[in-house]
Image (cartoon, grey):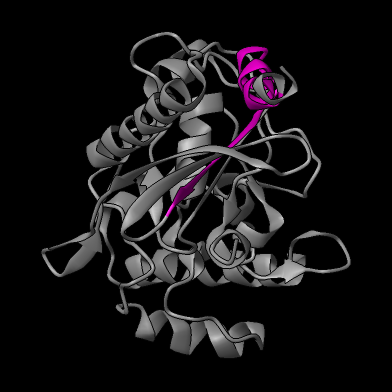
Amino acid sequence: MSGHTAINAPGALIQEGKAILGIEFGSTRIKASLISSDSTPLAAGSYEWENQLVNGIWTYDLDEVWKGTAGCYASLVKNVREQYGVELRSVAALGFSGMMHGYIVLDRAGKLLTPFRTWRNNITGEACDTLTPLFNFAIPQRWSIAHLYQSILENQDHVGKIDYLTTLAGYVHYRLTGKRVMGIGEASGMFPIDPNTGTYDQRMVDQFDALVAPKGYPWKLKQILPQVLVAGDRAGELTPEGAKLLDPSGKLQSGIPLCPPEGDAGTGMV
């Protein structure tokens, strides 16, 4: 009898919505991990995908992002059902992480302005050659600020229409919660962070704004970057629309609290 109870304890935890869900967007696989509050693994799901080289840019189509997200979640739901005989309808907390850096820019209506540029693209050398000495801080080619400034140097039409600049994890979080926020680890791969303030380095922000001021763009840098949060900060809740993106079947409940989206520097080692 005691053995029977032990086997079903995780199922009861899941059924009561007390498990915790993390989803990681890796370069070749989207992975979901369902755990208990003491970090015991309970169930897992996955979805395989691959980036594409399109017009010289390594990218993922955003439709594939949502197909993969839903597919990964469905795989997790199936694993829960097979292991415990229960339906996954809610969790105690939810979080996303993904491949760091890159460039996703949206207009005011939330429309993608140019194809998602992943961390694999080494096309921002000219931008880095300017930003590194300007900031007196090494800016790698994969960083979001390098992609932004390279687009400016090339006079790309979309730059003046930017309302939000983010990464893959930040984009998914934004669509699921409506919140333009990011964990400090992920944010540090977009723009340099001041360790004393825990947010973007203001001196460098001012230097960048002055550098691009002659272009007359309708934005300042901090207006288009996500707000920086740290572990433990509440980063929004899953909206009804977000729940439907994650689970098109409609069984997943909205209102689940989310942690700040993070990069794979930490999650990739788990």
Give coordinates of residue 28: x percent, y percent: 31, 59
Residue at 48 percent across and 27 percent down: it is 83
Residue that lies at the very extreme toward the right in this rendered image: 196
Write down the quadrant of residue 239 in the picture.
Answer: top right
Would residue 74 be found to the left or right of residue 33 on screen? left
Residue 8 part of the magenta-drawn span = yes
Relative horizontal placement of residue 88, taking residue 117 as reference (left or right): right
Location of the C terminus (image quadrant): bottom right
Residue 80: in magenta span: no
Identify which residue, 204 or 263, lies in the foreground.
Answer: 263
Relative vertical location of residue 45 with respect to residue 124 in this rendering, above or below: above
Marker count (numbered): 0
Residue 218 seen in this snapshot: no
The structure residue drawn at horizontal position 48% and vertical position 49%, both measured from the top left corner, is 24
Depth check: give the residue in front, 68 or 36: 36
Report if residue 199 is visible in the image.
Answer: yes
Question: Looking at this view, is 114 or 6 the one in front?
Answer: 6
Percent x, y of residue 121: 30, 73
Residue pushed farthest front?
1
**Image point (76%, 33%), residue name:** 234
Q: State the extent of the magenta-drawn residues as a range.
A: 6-25
- Provide residue 2's location: percent of width, then percent of height: 75, 22
Residue lying at 53% horizontally and 13% vertically, measured from the top left: 89
The N terminus is located in which quarter? Answer: top right
In the image, residue 10 lies at what x, y percent? 65, 26
